[in-house]
Structure formats: C-alpha cells, structure tokens
Image (tube, rainbow, N blue to C red):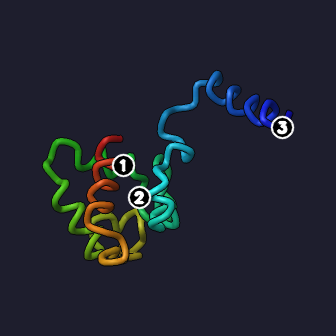
Amino acid sequence: MKAKWLSVPAAALLVMGFSTAQAADMPPLAKKSGCTACHAIDKKVVGPAWADVAKRYKGKGAKADLVSKVKKGGKGNWTEVTKGVPMPPYSPRVSDADIEALVDFVLSL
C-alpha cells in the first residue's frame, strides 16, 4: 500500500514537467564522491552549478583540463562565483575513471 502513495508524488513531478537537470538526476557517483557538498546541477552551492560549467566549456575540448582540475583541485576559474573558495583535490580519494565519468556527466548537461 505504501508503494502506491510514494509513486503518486513522483508521477506528479513528471506530469508537472520538471527539467531533466534536477537534483534527483545527480549521478550516485557524484553523491558518493562528495561532489554534492559544493555542487548542484542547476544552482550555485559553494562551487558553480554544473550546468554553468558545461555552458562555459561547451565545445572547447576542455575535458582533460577539467579532469585535471578535479584531480588536483585549484582556484581562480570561478572566483566570481566561489568568492575565492578553492576546489579541493579529489585524487587519489576518487579514482581516475570515476573522475572522468563525472566530468563526462557535467559536460553532457
């Protein structure tokens, strides 16, 4: 019986036409890796919205640079958004393959 009640709100959200870039669409890998502490898909948290990152780097062949930034961390590219808070390094805590998958997801937005 509970399953029916839980599915009603979910169906209502779909009917209302929410965009595909909702927090529910965040890959489990992003949640597990700690990315959601500073990033969301469609709004600034501490770091920039991933949709804004995808827009800034669309078509610029930036995958390698973004992978490097996630691995090593850094600051300066989004100072107007982060107010100087640096991106922490995620390597080796997050595997290279997982970092690449996360960057692919961000660039796909």
Labels 3 and 1 touching (C-beta < 8 A) = no
SS assignment at label 3: helix
Q: Residue at x 79, y 30 (%)?
A: 4
Give the spatial CA distance, label 2 vs label 1: 7 Å
Rendered location of residue 78, percent (x, y): 33, 64
Q: Looking at the image, tell me whether mark 3 or mark 1 is earlier in sequence order.
A: 3
Q: Nearer the viewer, mark 3 or mark 2?
A: 3
Residue 2's disc is 3
Q: Residue at x 35, y 41 (%)?
A: 109
Labels 2 and 1 touching (C-beta < 8 A) = yes
* Left or right: 30, with 65 as reference point: right
SS assignment at label 2: loop
Is residue 25 placed above or below 63 in the rendered structure?
A: above
Q: Nearer the viewer, mark 3 or mark 1?
A: 3
Q: Amino acid at mark 1?
A: Asp
Q: Nearer the viewer, residue 101 or 68?
A: 101
Q: Residue at x 31, y 54 (%)?
A: 101
Residue 52's disc is 1
Labels 3 and 2 touching (C-beta < 8 A) = no
SS assignment at label 1: helix
Q: Label 2, on which residue?
A: 48
